[in-house]
Every structure is written in structure tokens, then in C-alpha cells.
Amino acid sequence: MTDNTELLRFTTAGSVDDGKSTLIGRLLYDSKSIFQDQYDQIKDATERRGEEGVNLALLTDGLKSEREQGITIDVAYRYFSTPKRKFIIADTPGHIQYTRNMVTGASTANVALILIDARNGVVEQTRRHAIIASLLQIPHIVVCVNKMDLVDYSQEEYSKIQESFEAFAAKLDVVDVHFIPISALLGDNVVSRSEKTPWYNGPTLMYYLENVHIASDHNFIDARFPVQFVIRPNTDEFHDYRGYAGRLAGGIMKKGDTVTLLPTGFSTKIKQIIGPDGEQDEAFPPQSVTVLLEDDLDLSRGDMIVRENNQPEITQDIEVMLCWFDSSRPLQQRGKYSIRHTTQDARCIVKEIRYKLDINSLHRDLDDKNINMNDIARVVLRTTKPLFIDCYRKNRNTGSIILIDEASNNTVAAGMII
């Protein structure tokens, strides 16, 4: 039996003490996704800390140093499900020195929850998170105005925050923004509706997460199938079998379609598509399948199967927005790195650092070329072999890269192709 409930990935962001971890704890607790012993454990921990009630934030702050400081440092992933959907939450830290962690946690998200403390309104952190969400092209943004209980559930305060955020978001590339007044601590409008906000007639957060339409977040137009692995059993039964396994990164592929193979440019037809449950007539993202072709053509890992009249750009010069991850060394102009793009590995050189982006004001600093950890910059790379790219806005799979330091093998940057 296959489980067809849809998976929604969402990321939470907000500044320190805006209540992100409490909100996730509340979602897990109210959706009955934690076990009684976990609940008892955090109840004991809350009492030991001399706090009242049950501190649900302790559910997600897994690192001891986070619990001690009462802050979130690393990206914590939590999984829960309701009868309608499965969820993966990336709880990302709010501090500026953890921008890279936020980029990591948000890169695959369908929805970004941005928390705002109702007492403080839109602060610098809020703006930075909104900028990162727009840079990473997260399709849906939910602004949770938290701690409504501390402003007496005032509609006026809520409206002020909504107007202020909308004015700022107008400058960004964000399409779908939704606002919800909540109290994570008391549970208002998180899973169940609150009687204290009679002026709010939108959905609760849980209802929104269960029903937001995410099926069309994938690109179903541009067919892209990066080959991950070539399957050649070489047994008597499957003597001439040659299947290409991978995960569809865009578009829809059907049996009988005419396709082009990159980099050779040869054309052929799809003979069979085999999924986890056997043969299927078509495949779409993010399915992992094996494709069999009618002609015996040479394809290996890193090559790509595309439509003949809809192809990615094939180039060795790539312009990217890079978020720098490495704490030990800044980005080197003319520096050499390994680059990974879909299933391709190549090497590259940093040809030019165009500008550094001020993540608080969107200002482009053309003079400062020192790109240190957590900085975001626009950079031109030259690769040793052509890559098959789309711009990130069109396809998050074929539009993203990572850079690896060849000496230490550390991932030093993630980039969005412009």
C-alpha cells in the first residue's frame, strides 16, 4: 500500500524570543503528535527550570546549548502528520549569525512562517527573513502575529503590523502572503479558533497548513530528468536492460514521448517508466523513477533527459546569488571550488564578485568584496564543463548549486542561479 497523503515542508523564522519553538510545540501538542512520555518529560523540565505550566518550546530545542540559553541554534527538523497531510518543519534560528542555517532549512520549503511579536511589530529580523524567503522563492508566506495575549488581542495593533509588513513586502518578490493573529503560548488560532479575536475571520494556522494548495509549486512545464544512476543488471533475464534512475526535477514525462539527451543532443523516445510500484504511464516531480529508452544511447550520471523543444541553458558561465557558509575562510576571488548541480559534479573558479547584498535593506554594496560567513553576494562562476541550468525562479531544482572546498570537503556555499 502506498501512502498518498501530501507532504508539506514549512520553515519557521522570526527573531529571538518571538516564540517559534513554542509555536511548533503547540502545533505538535494540539495536533496530538507527541507522546505522553515526551509531554511528561518537558513538564518535568519546565518545573526544574522554575517555570509555570508546560514550556512547549523545549520540544524542539534539541541541542543542550539551545536549552540552556533558551534559543535555537541549528536547524531542527520535526515530523508530524494529521489525517489530511504529512508535515516536515524546519525550525531555523533567528540570529543574523545563523543566516546560513536559515537558508539551508528554507531551501526546500513550500511555506515560510514568519513570526512577529505583536508588541514589537516589524523589526529588522522580520525584514531579513522576508528577504531570504523571497530570495529562496518560497511560494507561500504566513505572517503569524504572535503574543496577541500581551496586547489584549487588539485588532488595531494587528492591523498596524499587517500594513507595515505589506508595505515592505511590496518591494520583494513574494506572491502569496497570509496573516494570522495567534498566541502560541495559549493556543489562540493555532489549531483551534480563538473567541478572543472575533474580528478575525480567516483560518487557523493548522487549517491553513492543511489546506494551502501546494501541488502547483513544482514546475510541471519544463521537463528535466537528471540521471542519477544507470541500472545494468547484466543477468540472463535482463540481458540488454539499461534503465536510467533519477528524480524528476521538472515537467511531466509520459511513455512514448520524444526526448532529447544532454549533452549529446541525440533524440529518442521513452519506452517505459518504472516507479516504486511497477510500470507507470507518466512521471512528475518529485517522483523518483527509472526511465527506459527505445534506442541504446550512451547516458551516464550527470546527463539530463529533456524535451526536444524545451531545453535548459547549457553554459559554463553561471551567475548566482551565493550564501556563504564557511566560518574559517571567506570567499576567494579567483578561488577554485567543486560545484554540484543536480547530479553533476564539476569544478569552478570564482570569476567575479559583483556585489554584496545587505540583507537588512536590500542595498547592493558594490565596493565591499569581502564575503564572510552568512553573507549573501552576487557572483559569476566559470565551470570546467557545461551545466544544464534554469534560473532558480523557474525551477528550484535545476536552478540551485552548492560549492565544496576541495581541501576540507566542506560545503562552503549554496547558490541560486539568476
Image (cartoon, rainbow, N blue to C red):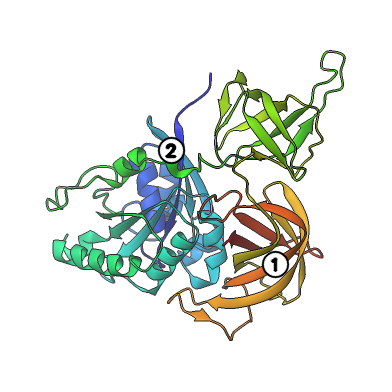
Q: Which residue in the structure is indicated by mark 1?
A: 381
Residue 265, x across and y down, in percent: 74, 42
Check the picture and name the quadrant holding the C terminus. Answer: bottom right
Q: Earlier in the sequence, mark 1 or mark 2?
A: 2
Amino acid residing under circle 1: Leu
Element carrying mark 1? strand
Whether residue 289 is visible here, answered yes or no, is: yes
Q: From the viewer's perspective, is 49 left or right of 280?
A: left
Q: Residues within 10 Å of mark 2 (few under 14, many from 20)?
A: few
Residue 305, x across and y down, in percent: 68, 38
Q: What is the quadrant of residue 412 in the picture?
A: bottom right
Residue 67, x across and y down, in percent: 49, 60
Which dot marks residue 215? Answer: 2
Which dot marks residue 5? Answer: none
Q: Residue furthest left?
A: 198
The answer to which of 251 and 51 lies nearer the viewer is: 251
Q: What is the quadrant of residue 156 in the picture?
A: bottom left
In the displayed structure, 153 sits above or below 190; it is: below
| Residue at the image position 61 percent from the left and 76 percent from the top | 354
Q: Residue furthest top?
A: 237
Element carrying mark 2? helix
Q: From the viewer's perspective, is 220 left or right of 233?
A: left
